């Protein structure tokens, strides 16, 4: 996930000894029931707003439980505010990812990635290649979010052209992205987990690799089998897709400069938000340099003369807005409602799209008749915007609202396929996800404020006496907090603090805990639709969680792998008789 400068002191655990486990589970049960009903009724539309409200209802139930356990309203509001504050970076990054996707479309960066990717990626090895490519990028950047927002989007586009399931592709992208996110020393979660458990970074990475490497190998094997079982059905149409892409965009290799710059900045530890902003602005510049014809088509507007003041009460120009510039289209002069005005001849302006013509001007006139008497002549003129204004509209629209580019091809099948790929999200498309995250943080904040998260974790800890039971309870706690608190960081912080003494009492080194936190807390966050990571990944890739869940093999297999290692005591490091310190805890015993 993106680095957000997590302050560990802010991630406190709120205890409430008066709250029983059954009371703590009431909001969880209520939320699960309400979400199940809502998803059944609304189906795929449930994330358009109704699930968000259900999360608020769940928070209300948690608040009522807290009220009867003497938790003040003010303390709940303060914890909600702290939760929402902790996601500020993620929310801003979401907006910038929407802007990035829009400008990377209109500049031709994403289409160019697809164009050359069709040359390189054979359908049989495509899914496995997605895992490897995303793993490399994520290790280098330390960010699954950046990986999805850059190469992930392009790989989804290539999958569409090759007739490969976007659900499978999204699962492969996330498997590789979270592999890198777990093992990269640049990742915030990779740094947070050992800090919570009490070990050092590189000992943590070393012991985490024991479960992570086998998991990614299994994942790659499965995707290789899936790839070869699907055959090479997509190869025949590749040249037609490439022809349509090159007819629509200038697919110069210079466009790769932008993603290379963005990835290099992330590697150099430049703020992800700043990196995405620079990537957005740089793509806008490249659009002006390399996609001039497309800019004319996407941003062309018209200035239309005003109706003279003496005629404003008599006639109006149909379809004209109050804005200074108007969209291409048909504008007709009509009589005002409830007037006895007529025109000597129709006055209609046909203003073409910028892709068809540039530097367009037109002027038409007609006489105004009142009760058959000529009251005067009106002339309406329209002129297209110059390239500067047109460019401003094209790039700003790509940044802020959903945009689309029509493929230049005579093949209806190719056109349909590419039309879905040539769509930019813009900031506007991210607002629903931001809404979801805020509502999820409200629920998680109230649950934390009433002490429910601590009660649930403590109860799970008390259920097991064996070493395997301790690992199992850690895994379940991380999953439960990912579901209830909807936050990846809390899924590491709360169990990390709650279980550190228990691991020490069992004679287990802290890297066992830090590894388990990552294997179950970090990777599973992308599998929960209302979790910040699940909401982000599904929106960025344009694939619902339910469609990629089963194919995100690395993400759901990781908790089972860590339990398998615990069950057979594989690489379970024991403490020495002497209590270790942070200076010696990374040494082999």
Image (cartoon, grey):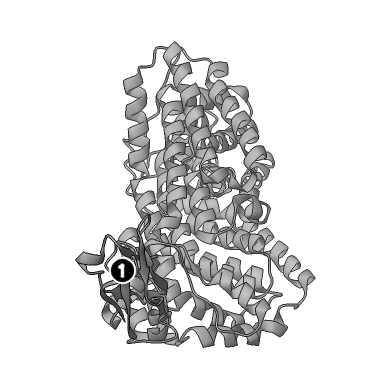
Compare residues 159 and 270 and report the one nearer the observer: 159
Q: Position of residue 254 (x, y in %)?
A: 40, 85
Of all residues, the one furthest to the left in this rendering is 309
Compare residues 78 and 496 and report the one nearer the observer: 78
Secondary structure category for the residue under label 1: helix
Placement of 241 over or under 127, stated as above or below: below
Task: Name the residue tied to disc 1.
Answer: 278
Placement of 30 over or under 365, stated as above or below: above
Q: Is residue 391 visible?
A: no
Which residue corresponds to the image point at 53% horizontal and 46% vertical from the top-left?
48
Of all residues, the one furthest to the front in this rendering is 372
Which image quadrant for residue 220? bottom right
Q: Is residue 55 visible?
A: yes
In the image, taking residue 524 as reference, residue 321 lies left or right, namely left
Q: Position of residue 89 (x, y in %)?
A: 34, 50
Q: Position of residue 19 (x, y in %)?
A: 48, 15
Compare residues 336 and 151 and report the one nearer the observer: 336
In the image, taking residue 505 as reference, residue 201 lies left or right, namely left
Which residue corresponds to the image point at 53% horizontal and 56% vertical from the top-left?
178
Callout 1: few (<14), some (14-19), or many (20+) C-alpha neighbours within 10 Å?
some
Placement of 58 over or under 307, stated as above or below: above
Placement of 302 over or under 453, stated as above or below: below
Which image quadrant for residue 476? top right
Compare residues 78 and 566 and report the one nearer the observer: 78
For the image shown, how many numbered marks are present on the structure?
Answer: 1
Q: Position of residue 553 (x, y in %)?
A: 65, 55
């Amino acid at each position: 996930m993106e680095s957000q400068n997590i302050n560990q002191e802010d991630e406190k655990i709120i205890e409430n000894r008066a709250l029983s486990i059954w009371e703590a589970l009431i909001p969880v049960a209520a939320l699960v029931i309400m979400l199940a009903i809502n998803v059944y009724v609304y189906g795929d539309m449930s994330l358009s707003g109704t699930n968000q409200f259900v999360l608020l209802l769940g928070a209300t139930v948690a608040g009522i439980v807290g009220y009867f356990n003497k938790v003040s309203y003010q303390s709940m509001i303060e914890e909600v505010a702290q939760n929402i504050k902790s996601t500020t970076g993620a929310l801003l990054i979401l907006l910038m990812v929407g802007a990035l996707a829009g400008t990377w479309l209109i500049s031709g960066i994403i289409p160019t990635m697809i164009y050359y990717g069709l040359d390189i990626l054979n359908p049989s090895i495509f899914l496995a290649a997605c895992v490897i490519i995303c793993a490399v990028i994520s290790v280098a950047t330390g960010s699954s979010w950046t990986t999805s927002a850059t190469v992930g989007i392009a790989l989804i586009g290539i999958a569409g052209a090759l007739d490969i399931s976007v659900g499978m592709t999204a699962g492969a992208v996330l498997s590789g992205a979270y592999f890198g996110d777990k093992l990269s020393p640049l990742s915030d979660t990779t740094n947070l987990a050992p800090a919570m458990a009490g070990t050092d970074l590189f000992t943590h990475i070393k012991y985490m690799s024991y479960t992570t490497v086998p998991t990614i190998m299994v994942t790659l094997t499965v995707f290789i089998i899936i790839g070869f079982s699907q055959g090479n059905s997509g190869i025949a149409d590749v040249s037609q897709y490439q022809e349509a892409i090159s007819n629509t965009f200038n697919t110069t290799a210079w466009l790769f400069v932008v993603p290379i710059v963005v990835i290099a900045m992330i590697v150099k530890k430049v703020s992800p938000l700043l990196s995405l902003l620079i990537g957005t602005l740089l793509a806008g510049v490249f659009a002006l340099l390399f996609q001039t014809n497309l800019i004319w088509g996407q941003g062309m507007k018209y200035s239309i003369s005003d109706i003279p003041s003496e005629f404003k009460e008599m006639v109006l120009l149909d379809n004209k807005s109050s804005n200074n510039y108007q969209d291409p289209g048909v504008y007709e002069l009509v009589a005002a409602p409830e007037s006895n005005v007529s025109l000597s001849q129709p006055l209609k302006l046909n203003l073409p799209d910028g892709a068809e013509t540039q530097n367009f001007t037109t002027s038409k006139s007609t006489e105004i008749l009142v009760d058959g008497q000529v009251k005067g002549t009106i002339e309406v003129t329209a002129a297209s915007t110059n390239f500067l204004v047109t460019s401003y509209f094209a790039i700003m629209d790509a940044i802020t609202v959903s945009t689309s580019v029509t493929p230049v091809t005579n093949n209806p099948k190719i056109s349909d396929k590419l039309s879905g790929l040539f769509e930019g999200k813009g900031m506007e498309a991210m607002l629903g996800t931001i809404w979801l995250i805020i509502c999820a943080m409200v629920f998680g904040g109230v649950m934390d404020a009433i002490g429910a998260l601590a009660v649930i974790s403590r109860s799970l800890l008390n259920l097991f006496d064996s070493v395997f039971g301790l690992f199992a309870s850690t895994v379940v706690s991380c999953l439960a907090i990912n579901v209830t608190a909807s936050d990846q960081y809390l899924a590491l912080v709360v169990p990390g603090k709650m279980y550190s003494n228990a691991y020490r009492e069992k004679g287990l080194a802290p890297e066992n805990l830090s590894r388990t936190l990552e294997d179950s807390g970090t990777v599973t966050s992308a599998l929960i639709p209302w979790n910040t990571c699940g909401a982000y990944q599904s929106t960025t890739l344009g694939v619902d969680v339910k469609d990629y869940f089963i194919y995100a093999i690395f993400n759901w297999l990781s908790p089972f792998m860590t339990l398998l290692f615990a069950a057979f005591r594989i690489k379970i490091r024991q403490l020495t008789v002497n209590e270790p310190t942070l200076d010696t805890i990374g040494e082999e015993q």
